Image (cartoon, helix red, strand yellow):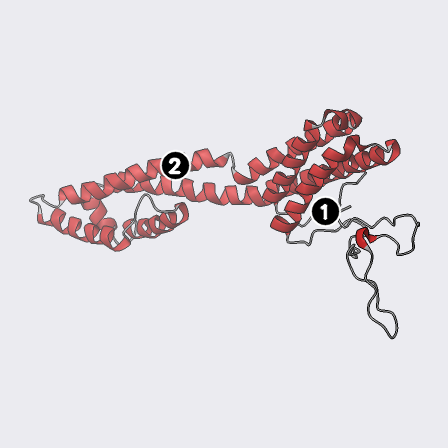
Amino acid sequence: MGEIKSISLTRMSNGVHFAFHLEVLACIQADKNVQSKVAGELQEYKNAFKAEDEALVISRKSFLSDEIAKADDERDSLYSAFKNTVKAFSNLPDPAARQACKVLGQAVKDYRINVDDQLDKETGMLTNMLTDLRGKYREEVETLSLTSLVDALYDANERVRNGMRARNEEKVGKSTGAMKKARLFVDKMYNLVVKLINACALAERTNAYDACINSLNAIIDHFQQQAIGEKVSKPAGDDEIPNPVAPAPPVSGGDPVTPPPGGGSSGGGSAEEELPDPLA
């Protein structure tokens, strides 16, 4: 008859914490006897875990993400239209138009913006380029009648930039607090369920809980070693395991005494001595 080991839940990252409780719940629910003994507390544990799952999803994906993606697609199309228009106008017969195309075409080459770049990188490069297009290259933009296109590109880029800033603020403000609160409640219910299982096993003095307890301890050992980096705790009394075949201490002034075969007493007719099992 064993008991479920302890583990430091607060040292786990959010992802590891989620994975640990996912495995624990699956283990307990697979044992119908154990599940029936802690049914009410187990349901609260599952509800708490569901709240943690929702908090974890929110921390990874904001509702603003869809709006950012939409604005990003729009600005990518507008930038491609701007670049292609400058290239197409380079063959215009008007010298002023050709000169404007030359200046803007060089700006396109200098900034080397790729619409497939990482979101922050593309946003930063476009912000700098648009500052030039609406400032020192304003005359060239007007010469090619591209002002409305540049303004639309500016608006789309600002929606992406503002959306990312708002999303970051949302993550820091909302999801972090929600995740912390969810984790605390999950850990509370986990500890209660563990105490109840250990108490039932002790009170009933039966091996009916051994399979579940052993499985849970295997999960705990795994996460202690692989995810947290703690040493796996040993069961009580395992620090010094007797050696069943160790020779007896030497007799003073003589050779070591060799134990008789089978480990019994050397005296005739005495009962055979039981040796401790190191794997018990």
Mark drawn on residue 71:
2
Instruction: Compute the Cα span from label 1 to label 2.
Output: 46 Å
Coordinates of residue 10 in the picture (x, y in percent): 69, 48
- In which quadrant of the rendered view does residue 240 lie? bottom right
Q: Amino acid at mark 2?
A: Ala
Above or below, 141 against 208 in this view is below
Coordinates of residue 109 in the picture (x, y in percent): 23, 53
Sequence-first disc among 1 and 2: 1
In the image, 25: left or right of 195?
Answer: left
Among all residues in the image, which is located at the extreme front?
A: 268
Choose between 13 and 213: the one closer to the eye. 213
Q: Amino acid at mark 1?
A: Ile
Coordinates of residue 273 in the picture (x, y in percent): 87, 50
Mark 2 closeness class: few <14, some 14–19, many ≥20 residues within 10 Å: many
Q: Residue at x 77, y 56 (%)?
A: 245
Tag 1 residue: 7
In the image, 246: left or right of 86?
Answer: right
Q: Residue at x 51, y 34 (%)?
A: 63
Q: Nearer the viewer, mark 1 or mark 2?
A: 1
In the image, 109: left or right of 5?
Answer: left
Mark drawn on residue 212:
none
Query: Helix, strand, or loop for circle 1?
Result: loop
Above or below, 156 against 126 in this view is above
Quadrant containing the N terminus in the rendered view: top right
Choose between 217 and 259: the one closer to the eye. 259
Q: Residue at x 68, y 44 (%)?
A: 220
Q: Residue at x 32, y 48 (%)?
A: 130
Choose between 32 and 20: the one closer to the eye. 32
Query: Helix, strand, or loop for circle 2?
Result: helix
Coordinates of residue 153 in the picture (x, y in percent): 32, 41
- In which quadrant of the rendered view does residue 172 lie? top right
